[in-house]
Amino acid sequence: MRELAQQLRVDAVRAADAAGSGHPTSGMSAADLMAVLFSKYLRYDFSAPENQANDHLVFSKGHASPLLYALYKAAGAIDDAELLTFREFGSRLQGHPTPEIPWVDVATGSLGQGLPIAVGIATAAAKLESSELRVWTLCGDSELAEGSMWEAFEHAGFAGLSNLIAVVDVNRLGQRGPTMHEWDTSKLAARAAACEWHVQEIDGHDLEAIDAAYAAALAADRPAVIFARTKKGSGVSAVEDEPGWHGKPLADAEAAIEELGGIREVSVAVQAPPAPKPYEIARAEVERPGYEIGEKVATRGAYGDALAWLGSIDEKVVALDGEVGNSTYAERFAAKHPERFFEMYIAEQQMVASAIGMQTRGWKPFASSFGAFLSRAYDFVRMGAISDADLKLCGSHVGVSIGADGPSQMALEDIASLRAVLGSVVLYPSDANQTVALLDAMRQHRGVSYLRTTREKTPTIYAPGEEFRIGGSRTLRSDSADRLTLIGAGITLHECLKAADDLAGKGISARVIDLYSVKPVDAGAVIAAARETGAIVTVEDHWAEGGIGDVVAAVLAEAGVAARLERLAVTERPGSGPPEELLAAAGIDAAHVVAAAQRVAEPVGA
Amino acid sequence: MRELAQQLRVDAVRAADAAGSGHPTSGMSAADLMAVLFSKYLRYDFSAPENQANDHLVFSKGHASPLLYALYKAAGAIDDAELLTFREFGSRLQGHPTPEIPWVDVATGSLGQGLPIAVGIATAAAKLESSELRVWTLCGDSELAEGSMWEAFEHAGFAGLSNLIAVVDVNRLGQRGPTMHEWDTSKLAARAAACEWHVQEIDGHDLEAIDAAYAAALAADRPAVIFARTKKGSGVSAVEDEPGWHGKPLADAEAAIEELGGIREVSVAVQAPPAPKPYEIARAEVERPGYEIGEKVATRGAYGDALAWLGSIDEKVVALDGEVGNSTYAERFAAKHPERFFEMYIAEQQMVASAIGMQTRGWKPFASSFGAFLSRAYDFVRMGAISDADLKLCGSHVGVSIGADGPSQMALEDIASLRAVLGSVVLYPSDANQTVALLDAMRQHRGVSYLRTTREKTPTIYAPGEEFRIGGSRTLRSDSADRLTLIGAGITLHECLKAADDLAGKGISARVIDLYSVKPVDAGAVIAAARETGAIVTVEDHWAEGGIGDVVAAVLAEAGVAARLERLAVTERPGSGPPEELLAAAGIDAAHVVAAAQRVAEPVGA
C-alpha cells in the first residue's frame, strides 16, 4: 500500500507536469487514503462499469483529478500514455472529472456537490434497490464551508444511510491560504456527530489508522465520516504543507519524483463486487388523468395527477419535493407511490443533488418546488447538465399571477436561467391536459428538462389524451384575415385568447399561438406567423430578459423576418395583490394585449 | 407582556382574515418571543429608521409577516387601518416583508436568507463601525434545513459576532407536515454549539424563560441562538399545533379573537438606541491604475488593481471573496485595505448575503468569485434585487477561454442568469483600462451590478483614464464601406478585431463594436450599425441562450430592422484544453468570425 500510495503521488506529479497545470498537491494529500481504499475496501469491476453492484466512488474534491486518474492507471483501467494526456484537448481526462470517463458518475469541480450527490446515490441503493453496494466520497476540507455539504450531512444522517462513507482530506490549505479550521477537526466532527453520523478523526497518512477507520466505518449502522488530517503535497518537501502550491504543477517534477522513490509499476487488484440482487418495486395502478374542456384546473394540480400516473406506468419514476408537496401537488404522487417519494424538506440543493445521484442508477427523478426556490439549486442544475444528467424539474407558482404572496415567491427568472443550461428543455404548459402530455414527454426525454406550472386555475382548452411534443407549438386561432399574431404560454395564453376575442369584436383578426415549448422552440411556427400576419405580440409572466419575447425576437432576427414585434413582460418590481390586479399592473393582461395588438396590427388592406 | 403577546396574535389573525390569505399561525407561535423582545430588549427608534444606532430586526421567517406588522402597530409605527391593508394591491404590507417598509432592511420570504444577511449586518456593525447595536433575527425551524443557515452559523461563530442573536421559533410544523427534528432541538443545538455559538433551548411560550434567555444572550461573548420550542397557532385551540394550517387564515377568526381575549389597544414603548458613535476608516493611498495600449493584461487583474484604487477614493467600498482572491485578484484590495476585506471561504451564499447585509448600512460591497460559482448564490442575488440592494458582483474565469480546468469552472450562463435579475447591470469589459472605468461606474451606480472578467491576458486597446459609461458601447472600426458589423465583448472582441483585419485583407470592410454593457444595452449603436452595414455577426464566450446574440436580436426585432444576423456562441459541452483550441472548437475564434462574416456580408455594390 505504501508503494501504491507513492506511485499515486508520482503519477499525479507526472500528469500535472505533462499538462502544465492541474492540482497535484491536492491529490498527494489523499494518496494514502485512496491507496488503502483501492487495495482493500472498494468493490468495483473496472471492466464493467455498468455492473449495478459496483460500489460508487465520487471525488467531491474534483480538482484532485490527477490522483483519480493515477488510481485508474493503478487499477489497470487506463494506461500510462493516456494518463499523460491529462487536460489535453480531446482527452477524456479533463481538468475535473466528468462522466465522459465510464467510471465517473457525475461531474465535480464545483465544490460542495459531490457529497450531496453521493447521498442521492446512497439513497437509491439503500431505499429503492436494497443493494449492498457502498458509496465512497472523497471530500476536501475547504468545501465543508459550503452549506450544501451540511444539507448532505443532515439528510444522510436522518435517513440512516449506512452505505455512505465520506472521507474528508483535511489538508489544511485551501486555494489562497489556510482553511477556517485548519487541522482542528473537532468542531467539524461535533457537527457531523450531531447529524447522527459515525465520526472518526485520524492521521490521514497512517496506513494502519486508515485501514482501521474504513473497517469501523463499514461496521457502523449509520453514515460514516472520516476526518483525516493530511499534508497538502505530502511526500515532497518542496511543497508539503506549503502555501502557494494550489492548482499548480510542481516546479521541479523530476526532483519530486526522485524524492518519492521514482516511477513505479504497481498495480492494484480491486475487489470485484458481489453478484447484483434483483429487487421489486411497488406499483399502484393510476389512470392517465384527463380533464373536460372548459374545466378550470391549475397546471400544478395536473402535475401532481400526471406524476402519479407516470409512477404507475414507469416503475423508474421517482419524485422529490422541497417540503411544499401540498403546493406543487407532488403529494399526489406520494399518496400513490410512497416508497418512491422523497421528502427533501427545505433543502433545494440537496433535492437536486439527490435527483442527480438517483439518475446515475437509472432512476427517473422528478424534483419539484416553487419555481422561485429552484434558483437556490442553480449551480447544481448547471453541473447536472455537464454530468449529462437525466434531471426533470418542476417549478410551480411562477410569475406575478401567484398574487398575494409577493415577489419573493414569484419565479420571474426561471425561463431565462434554465434556458441557459446546456441542452435543457423548458416547457410552460397552458392547460391541464397539455401538462399531462408534456410530463410524459419529459419522462421519455433524457436530459435536463424543466416544467413551469401555474398557481391559479385556468380553463382546460385541449382535449384529454391529446399529444404534445417537446419542440412543438399549437396554433389556436388562425385565419387568412389575421392581421397579427399573439404568442403566449401558460397563464398568458389565456390572456391572449381573451384579447383575441376582444380584438375580433373590434374587427381585428388575430392569430393565437401557444408557445408551450420555450426551448427548443418551434421556430417554423413563429416565422410563418410573422410572414403571414406581419406583426407579433408576445406576452409572458416573466421578466423581459431571456424569456419568450427574447426567444421570438431571436427566431425572427436570425431568420431575417422583419415583422413588427411588441414584447409584453414584467419589467417592474411587483407587490402583493389579487392575481388579476398584478397581471394588469405588470401590463400583461388581456387589456394590455389588446392595446399592444392595436399598435402593431397590420393596417386593413395592407 | 402577556397582553401584548395576545394582541399580536389577535392582530395577526385579523390581518390574515382581512386579506383572505397569509400565515397567521406562523406568527402566533413567535408572539411571546417578540413581545418580550419589543418590551424589554430591542432598541429602535421607529420615528427615525435611518438612525445608525438602531438595532436591526430581520424576520428570516418572512412569512410570519402578520406578526411583524402587528408589532409595528403595537410600537405605534403603523395604525390599525393600515394593518388591515395586509396583502392588498398597493399596500406596503406585502405577503412577505420588503424594504418598501422603512423598518425592513431586506426582503425575506425565500427561507434561509435572513440569518445569513443578519451575519452581514452584524459584521458591518462590529468589524467596520465598532457600533453597539445588536442584530436580532427571528428564524423558523423549517429553514434550518437550508445549508445557507449553517454557512451563517459557521461564519458568525468564526468571526465571534457577539452582537448577533438568532431566535429560532421551533414550532415543529412546516408547510406540509412535521419538520425533520420537530421539538427535539438537541441536535440543532449541538451543531450550533460546534459552530461556537452561545446556545440555549427554552419553552418559547414561557415569558420568564424568554426574558432570561435574552439577558443571557446579550451577556454572551459570542453569537447567541435561542431554540424556542413553540406551538404553531399558539393560543387558538382550533389550530394550535395542528397540521394543515400553514399559510391560511383561520376558519373562524371571530371565535379565535374571542378565545385570545378580544381586540386590545396595548402599545409598547420600544427603547431608543444610544447615541451613535463616530468611527474611523483606515484608508491607504492607491493611484488609479492605467495600462499602456498594447500591454497584455487580464481584466481580472485590472479588477484587483481597480478595486484597490476604489478603496482608496471611497472609504465605503468593501470587498468580499470566496477563497479565490488570488484568482479574482481581490487579494490586491486586501493587501491595501485589510480591514475592509472579508474572506468568505468557499461559501458563496454567505458571501452574497454578507454583502447584502453590509449595504443595508451604507457600505458598498464588491463580492467576487469565479463566475461559475456565483451561480451558487443565484437565489440570494434574485432576492437582493427585490431588496433594492446595492450589490456589486464580479465573476472571473468566464467562458471556454479559461482552458484546461474544464466546463465545471466555466461561467457560460452568467450573462443570461444575471440579465434576468430585476434592474441589474451586466458589464463585460474588453480591456484593463475599460475594467477600471467600469468598476468605478459600478461603484457610483446603486443597484445590482455584475462585472464579468476574463482569465486570459488580452491586449490593452483603450487609453488609460478613458471613461466608459453603463449603457454605452464603443465602435472601434467604422467606415462608410462597411459591409457588416462584428459585435463582441470581452475576449471575443479581440477575436472580432483579428477577424476584421483578416476580412480587410479579403476586401471586406467590417465595423467592430465593443458591446461591453450587455445590460442596459446601447440599442442605438446596434440599430445604426444594422441599418448602415446591413449585416451583423455577434460573437460571445457564453451559451447562445440569453447572451449577447439574444440581446442584439431583441434590439433588432423590436426596432423592426431586418439586418442579416449570425450569432456565434458556445452550443456544445466544452472539455479541457488550451484556450485557443477551445475557442476554435466552440466556433467563436477569429477564423469562425471571418467565415460567418463572409456568409452574411452585404454583397459589394448592394
Image (cartoon, coloured by chain):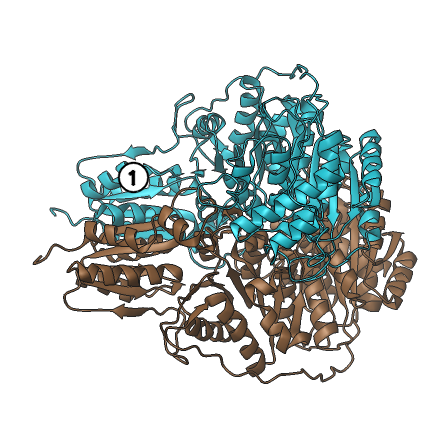
Chain colours: A brown, B cyan
Image x and y of residue A54, in percent: 73, 74
Q: How many marks?
A: 1
Q: Is residue B587 left or right of residue B230?
A: left
Say which chain tag 1 marks. Answer: B
**The residue under label 1 is which amino acid type?**
Ala
| Front in this rendered view, residue B249 or B230 | B249
| Front in this rendered view, residue B206 or B329 | B206
Q: Is residue A347 left or right of residue A89?
A: right
Tell me which residue sits at (34%, 62%) in the image: A493
Quarter location, residue B330 = top right
| Front in this rendered view, residue B30 or A468 | B30
Q: From what the image shows, is residue B354 above or below residue A415?
A: above
Q: Is residue A77 left or right of residue B421?
A: right
Tell me which residue sits at (76%, 73%) in the image: A133
Instruction: Tell me if residue A114 can be seen.
Output: yes
> Where's the C terminus of chain A, which quadrant?
bottom left
Image x and y of residue B126, in percent: 71, 26
Quarter location, residue A100 = bottom right
> Where's the N terminus of chain A, which quadrant?
bottom right
Q: From what the image shows, is residue A283 above or below residue B46?
A: below
Q: From what the image shows, is residue B437 above or below residue B17?
A: above
Q: From what the image shows, is residue A210 above or below residue A310?
A: above
Instruction: Tell me if residue A252 can be seen.
Output: no
Q: Specify few, some or many for label 1: CA neighbours under 10 Å numbering under 14, 14-19, or 20 or more.
A: some
Residue that carries the numbered disc 1 in the rendered image: B523
Local SS, label 1 = helix
